[in-house]
Amino acid sequence: MADGGYLGAGGRLAGGPADELVEAAYAHELRAAPRLAYDLSLSDIAHAVALTESGALPAETARVLLGGLLELHAIPPAEFPWHAPLGDAFNSREAELVRRIGSDAAGWLSAGRPRREAFRVALRACSRRGAAELVSALADASGALALHSRSLRDALAADYTYLQAAQPTTAGHLLLTYAYPALRDAERLQRAHRELSRSVAGAGGSAGSRWPLDRTRLAELLGCEGLIAHTKDAAWQWDVYVELLAAIAIAATHLSQLAQDFEIYASHEFGLIELADRHSRASALMPQKRNPYALAAIRTQAGQAAGDVAAALTVMHTGSARTDHFHLLNGLVPRALEEAGAVTRLAAAVLAGMRVDTERMARAAREGFTNAADVADVLAASEGLDYRTAHKVVGLAVRRLVEQGAGELTADAVAEAALELTGTALAVDPADLDPAACAQARLQTGSSSSAAMDAMLAEVDAQSAADRAWSRGALAAAQAAEALLLERAAALAAG
């Protein structure tokens, strides 16, 4: 049998946990400790401050308890003496606190609070910080795309559907496609952050406690805005984490789509973009290869993020007021946020550092019959054909040219197809066939025309800047609340 630990000694249980329980459960939980340790410490300090301010603790006990907690707070998580046989991170922290200040003072840490509350508070704080950092990384990604798009606003390119050349567009318009999903992802994360900013501290077991803990004051100490009102809901709520994981997974999937597209665009066959050397990897066997390795890393994390949502939802299929899901979430959520932040920062760096081959893009637009739909529009609008007939005329012209081995739509080919289908030879202005002119002839908001592009670039720039500012503000507010909490704790510890 393993060491029974601090909580087991002389309590409800006669002996310590089985070695198998330590290996399969306690040690597994403890692996999440380093990521949550800092916020667990702040949770303990805030609880002790609230107890002290309520008058529940004798002054000397409060002074010793807070002094010990501040000592623990100064220990880096990697250096903390975690001990799996004791159970989770809370138990290891409590055992170390007892070792330093004795059980008389340390024993008050759980007054009016089960250890799961410490984890709930810590997980929300860790999640808020991770969400705010991820918003900043997404803003950098959308900003990098906008920077390229502005310089390539009028550079001819082919748009692609099903990986086939579709319509003439511009390189700027093509790249800006990927900015808008990142903006939506940032908005989803900000919504999750707002919900995570509601405090669950001071809920007690499930129905509250007899201790005079002011939940509003606890929320203030922890930098939260508002409360989860119902104490049992506060103690066991999980849906906000699934929303957060879903937002992470959606953002990761958007980046995965970008990475898959760009891996194709960077291929020898397409050659439209090239990643910087620092984001590529050489082949151990084939000297000529220059693999876009960063894109593979981005795609891999998206798969993990999708699996995280499925795992979280699956483990929720249990009765209420059980710890099953928090065994998973305490480790999964901080890890998911850490990985998403790292990969999103990588994606932003890849986008900022890549090179776009505008000549290759323009050539693809001119050789892929991308102007076919525009020519059909012209025939229907100015030559008196109904649109379906105009569509058939251009389609026939393309088929004849492909049969002849040609790769570019000509006025003569369109006239011959019109004569074959309608019996009338139609004169087409060669200027209407120019793909670059087609890309600029769009009339709609959000199109590839210069005017539409200018409006979208201004929008993306403004929203990216707003997202960065929001992230800075959210992180600064959390740091300010933390500083005030530690200052208050130090003052109380000094008597």
Image (tube, helix red, strand yellow):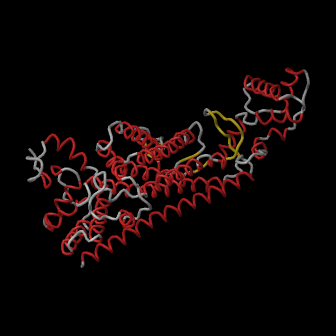
Spot occupied by residue 430 in the image (x, y as percentages of width and height): 85, 38
Q: Nearer the viewer, residue 336 or 397?
A: 336
| Residue 273 horizontal side relative to residue 246, left or right | right
Nearest the viewer among 201 and 64 is: 201
- Residue 259 in the image: above or below residue 9: above
- Total numbered labels: 0
Q: Is 421 placed above or below 210 here?
A: above
Q: Is residue 56 shown left or right of residue 217?
A: left
Which residue is outermost to the front? 210
The C terminus sits in image quarter: bottom left
Residue 359 x/y as whole percent: 67, 46
Image coords of residue 140 (percent x, y): 53, 57
Percent coordinates x, y for residue 71 in the rendering: 22, 69
Instruction: Give the vertical position of 94 relative to 367 (above or below).
Output: below
Residue closest to the eye, 377 or 54: 54
Q: Quadrant of the N terminus?
A: top left
Residue 290 in sight here: no
* Left or right, 342 with reference to 488: right
- Quarter holding residue 478: bottom left
The residue at the point 53 percent across, 64 percent down is 469
Can I make out residue 93 in this image? yes
Q: Is residue 381 left or right of residue 77?
A: right
